[in-house]
Amino acid sequence: MTFPLPPVEWPLPDEDATVALAQRLAALVCGHAPESLPPGGRIHLRGELGAGKTSLARALLRAGGVTGRIKSPSYALLESYNVSNLYFYHFDFYRFSDAHEWRDAGFGELLADAAVVLIEWPEQAGTRLPPPDLDILLEYAGTGRRAWLSACSEKGQLWLTHLTSSRR
Ligand SMILES: Nc1ncnc2c1ncn2[C@@H]1O[C@H](COP(=O)(O)OP(=O)(O)OP(=O)(O)O)[C@@H](O)[C@H]1O
Ligand SMILES: [Mg+2]
């Protein structure tokens, strides 16, 4: 199998649709879905400014059990959470430029954990990032959005199979 697989189109006509996709993904990524894999995995969120990356990430974190305020990590680069022994790392590399920052912050170690890792603007981290399990490209579509979901690992492929088979 050669990853990434061709992307699957997922219309998101309004923000409720984005939340619904995030909830279904959360069930899979957090190990709550009945047919689930072990919890954890990495998702890249790509798309231009305002495409809905943070909206999707926030809804996924909420569905994963994160309570309280969920800040966009655009200034801090990273916001982390812990829910019932599962770590969530939400990165935004929009302002990222410095390779030293990467090493000093120990980001590489976080990626190796069995955690839920969501990364906005992964392209800004260049080659430092390993491929994700799932790549999500968000684009504008009229007043709504459209997502393109690409599996980049066997785990991502299983998530996508579950998502598409339960699609209505
Ligand atoms: N499916 C959708 N249809 C219409 N509007 C949406 C949809 N999903 C999210 N939005 C809206 O689009 C905006 C997206 O903002 P958001 O901060 O999530 O974008 P972003 O991709 O993270 O941008 P940035 O690159 O600046 O971090 C929000 O105002 C949100 O309400
Ligand atoms: Mg954002």
Image: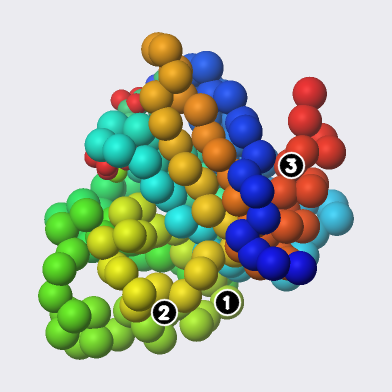
Crowding at label 3, few (<14), some or many (≥20) Cα neighbours within 10 Å?
some
Q: Which mark is residue 28?
A: none
- Cβ atoms under marks 1 and 3 closer than 8 Å: no
For label 1, the SS is: loop
Q: Percent x, y for residue 111?
A: 45, 77
Q: Which residue is mark 2?
A: 110
**75, above or below 1, in the image:** above
Three-letter amino acid code of the residue under disc 2:
Leu
Crowding at label 1, few (<14), some or many (≥20) Cα neighbours within 10 Å?
some
Q: Residue at x 79, y 23 (%)?
A: 168
Question: Could one spot residue 165 in this view of the protein?
Answer: yes
Q: Percent x, y for residue 32?
A: 73, 54
Q: Percent x, y for residue 44?
A: 46, 56
Crowding at label 2, few (<14), some or many (≥20) Cα neighbours within 10 Å?
some
Number of marks drawn:
3
Q: Percent x, y for residue 99?
A: 18, 80
Q: Residue at x 73, y 57 (%)?
A: 157
| Of marks 3 and 2, the one in the foreground | 3
Q: Which residue is mark 3?
A: 163
| Of marks 1 and 3, the one in the foreground | 3
Q: Is residue 62 left or right of residue 134?
A: left
Q: Is residue 51 left or right of residue 105?
A: right
Gap in angstroms between the C-alphas marked 3 and 2: 26 Å
Q: Residue at x 35, y 75 (%)?
A: 127
